[in-house]
Amino acid sequence: MARTTIDIPVPDLSGKRAVLTGGSDGIGVILARRLAAAGADLVLPVRNRGKGEATTAEIRARVPRASITLQVLDLSSLDSVAAFAGTLLDDGRPIDLLINNAGVMTPPERRTTADGHELQLGTNHLGHFALVAHLMPLLCAGRARVTSQVSLAANRNSINWDDPQWERSYDAFRAYSQSKIAVGLFGLELDRRSRARGWGITSNLSHPGVAPTNLLAAQPGIGRPQESREIRIIRRLSAMGIAGTPETAALPALLASTSPDDAGGRFYGPRRFGHLSGPPAEQKPYRRLRGVEDAARMWRLSEELTNVSYPDGRPDDGTGEPPVPVRERHLPA
């Protein structure tokens, strides 16, 4: 039986600058294609420039007038995050949309980032936490909407507060769950702090449900030389219409970042089959993401681990400083 087409309308984004991480693979390619087709001026930061160039060519073949700027960004390196953000800050153009989509999933053995952080926490959460901090002047200037991609895994397990880097008894899936819970806590806390401090930013969460993407495919770079058993199961479920497709899995983030009715602080995901697939809709945030004290605790830990701080007020109105590395704030004049 043919699968029913699921889609949502996307408003005209002409003249708006959109930044999308993880836009050269899986769900990210779909998001990049849809944003470009809607007229956004798309900034596509990628770790693998070859894959980014291939994605850019594929999108321009479909959307000849697509406006895409390819940049290099490795979220597992805080120096790379700062360098990428510096390029955009030098350009000075306000950002209207930021989608924190990139991520890694379940390396079989514990691995670390260039800064010594557990790879999943460092890439999925800390890299994006630092990126938003560095880009605050441009996000505030554009009254941006920030969307952070979580996962069904954020509805399981918990933050390992005693050992957030998983240096003892590494568990790949629990560490992945933790990283996505951290992303969710951050996304909702960002919206609360924006309201309290007048940043003018709205922040939402989205999750893609379950779909056959490359997250669980062979990833030699993180120690998975062959595709996982889980991805084969997901492909079967997708063919049966129980799990989604990359196209449907991209829709919650697309809705979260472009819906004209959005007010911030919301959570979007597929609405069918236990939120595995189907049309996107607003949902109640997972219990693990709703703790205000946990969010504040994760925020403090993230500032400590990234050495990056957020402003007390709007970076451009004289009530606070632009976000800069903490170590630079304490240098003598």
Image: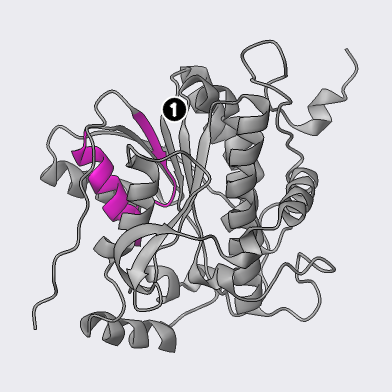
Q: Which residue is mark 1?
A: 95
The magenta stretch is 17-39
Extreme residue toward the right, this view: 332
| Amino acid, disc 1 | Ile
Name the image quarter holding residue 97: top left
Left or right placement of residue 109 versus residue 64 in this view: right
For image coordinates 80% across by 26% down, the residue present is 328
- Residue 38 is covered by the magenta coloring: yes
State whether residue 186 is above or below residue 87: below
State whether residue 281 is above or below residue 92: below
For image coordinates 82% across by 31% down, the residue present is 327
Q: Position of residue 83 (x, y in %)?
A: 58, 33
Name the image quarter holding residue 294: bottom right
For image coordinates 52% across by 19% down, the residue present is 90
Left or right placement of residue 10 versus residue 190 in this view: left
Q: Position of residue 331 (x, y in %)?
A: 87, 22
Extreme residue toward the left, this view: 1
- Residue 276 is covered by the magenta coloring: no
The answer to whether residue 217 shows anywhere in this view is yes
The answer to whether residue 50 shows anywhere in this view is no
- Near mark 1 (Cα within 10 A), the count class, few <14, some 14-19 or many ≥20, is many
For mark 1, give the secondary structure. loop
Q: Position of residue 273 (x, y in %)?
A: 35, 78
Please identify the quadrant where the C terminus is shown.
Answer: top right
Left or right placement of residue 49 versus residue 78 in this view: left
Please identify the quadrant where the N terminus is shown.
Answer: bottom left
